Amino acid sequence: MLLDVAACWPWLAPSSSGGAGFVARPRTACGLRTMADSSISHSMDPNPLHVAEDLWVFAYGSLMWRPDFPFVERVEARLVGAHRALCVYSFVHRGTPERPGLVLGLDQGGTCLGIAYRVSAAERARTITYLRAREQVTSVYRECMRPIWLKREPEQRVPALCYMVDRGHPQYAGRLTLEQQLHHVRQGHGQSGANRDYVIATVGALEQLGYRETGLHLLAERLAGTHEALVAVVP
């Protein structure tokens, strides 16, 4: 059964390039906040009292293995009070509205191990603009500053830019079974490529940190066939 994309997700419009795919409309529809209508202005820094300082960015998904912004330091880090979850339906990067994929979000509770990037003050504004364009296509995340712990001796606590999932957004998938995850990941393919590659690359990045996250690893093993077949090239 094909879904009426315009009716179900009116903030997405057909691509003007003539090819398949959709782009986000620059306006609010059906109560959803698009990137342009978010409570956070494009010109507003998420931590306005510190605009002249370096910025820490916490990465827990694809930013771990494909940051695509300049940074001066990369450190293993942990965030307390939220956990990594495959809980966001992807309509753009790893799927389409007709065939949604699944991507990661920071959801409430627990702890998340990831990577912290330190961005120079000179690149701060450009990096925030880039991240909003990448992460907030449909405003499924809430941009916020959260304390994280850098893996140093001793550990160092710093504020970091994080993207928490908005549980009230229609793309919030909640807690899915392994079979449901497999269904969406296997079918998902979007502007950034195959959903399967996203999951396997993220698991590869976690393994480089010496960390195994049971749910994600189980999913990746099913996608790859065997654990030994998991190969992720992390630049």
Image: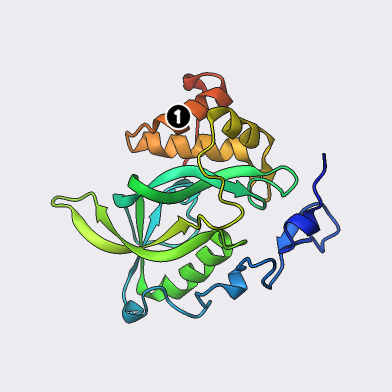
Q: Is residue 30 left or right of residue 4?
A: left
Q: Is residue 172 left or right of residue 217?
A: right
Amino acid carrying label 1: it is His
Residue 14 figure quarter: bottom right
Q: Residue at x 60, y 68 (%)?
A: 33
Residue under numbered circle 1: 217
View extreme (right): residue: 18
Q: Is residue 140 above or below residue 115?
A: below
Q: Could you say which is closer to the camera, residue 171 or residue 113?
A: 171
Q: Residue at x 61, y 54 (%)?
A: 170
Q: Is residue 160 above or below residue 183?
A: below
Could you classify mark 1 by the number of other residues whose Cα lies within 10 Å: few (under 14), some (14-19), or many (20 or more)?
many
**Whether residue 233 can be seen here:** no
User: Which corner quadrant holds the N terminus?
Assistant: top right
Counting from the top left corner in percent of width and height, residue 75 is at: 30, 51
Q: Is residue 164 above or below residue 104?
A: below
SS assignment at label 1: helix
Count of labels in the image: 1
Counting from the top left corner in percent of width and height, residue 45 is at: 42, 76
Q: Residue at x 31, y 52 (%)?
A: 79
Q: Could you say which is closer to the camera, residue 179 or residue 48?
A: 179
**Whether residue 218 can be seen here:** yes
Counting from the top left corner in percent of width and height, residue 46 is at: 41, 73
Q: Residue at x 63, y 46 (%)?
A: 94
Counting from the top left corner in percent of width and height, residue 119 is at: 37, 65
Q: Is residue 11 left or right of residue 81?
A: right
Q: Is residue 121 above or below residue 71?
A: below
